[in-house]
Image (spheres, rainbow, N blue to C red):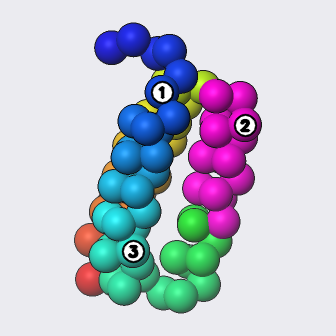
């Protein structure tokens, strides 16, 4: 996949990851979910500022995976 910055695609990836995180967040303790979400916001914010499409894709995928894994542990 071409890693050229695509704001529309980056926003789609972000919305998808946030929707999944929101859905899975109910399975985590509030403190744990908030800490992970804060970490995600810092990472994804930096990727957006750099307009780094590969970092946006990687972060969205990684944090959705982490929320799923933690949700399964705590559920």
Which of the two discs, 3 and 1, sits closer to the camera?
1
Residue at 48% from the left image edge and 27% from the top image edge: 6
Residue at 33% from the left image edge and 74% from the top image edge: 24
Q: Reply yes or no: does residue 39 show up in magenta.
A: yes
Near mark 3 (Cα within 10 A), the count class, few <14, some 14-19 or many ≥20, is: some
Q: Which residue position is annotated with label 2?
A: 49
Distance between the alpha carbons at the discs numbered 3 and 1: 24 Å
Q: Which element type, helix, strand or loop, lies under badge 2?
A: helix
Q: Magenta segment, principal secondary structure?
A: helix
Q: Which residues are magenta?
A: 38-51
Q: Which residue position is annotated with label 1?
A: 6
Q: Is residue 31 left or right of residue 20?
A: right
Q: Earlier in the sequence, mark 2 or mark 1?
A: 1
Q: Reply yes or no: does residue 2 show up in magenta.
A: no
Residue at 72% from the left image edge and 37% from the top image edge: 49
**Against 27, is 4 above or below?**
above
**Against 13, is 33 above or below?**
below
Near mark 2 (Cα within 10 A), the count class, few <14, some 14-19 or many ≥20, is: few
Question: Which corner quadrant holds the N terminus?
Answer: top left
Question: Foreground: 4 or 38?
Answer: 4
Q: Earlier in the sequence, mark 2 or mark 3?
A: 3
Where on the picture, by quarter, is residue 52? top right
Distance between the alpha carbons at the discs numbered 2 and 3: 23 Å
Q: Position of residue 10 (x, y in %)?
A: 46, 38
């Amino acid at each position: 996949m071409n890693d050229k910055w695509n704001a529309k695609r980056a926003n789609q990836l972000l919305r998808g990851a946030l929707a999944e995180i929101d859905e899975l967040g109910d399975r985590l303790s509030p403190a744990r979910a908030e800490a992970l979400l804060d970490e995600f916001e810092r990472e994804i914010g930096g990727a957006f500022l750099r307009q780094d499409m590969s970092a946006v894709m990687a972060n969205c995928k990684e944090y959705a995976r982490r929320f799923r894994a933690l949700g399964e542990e705590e559920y």
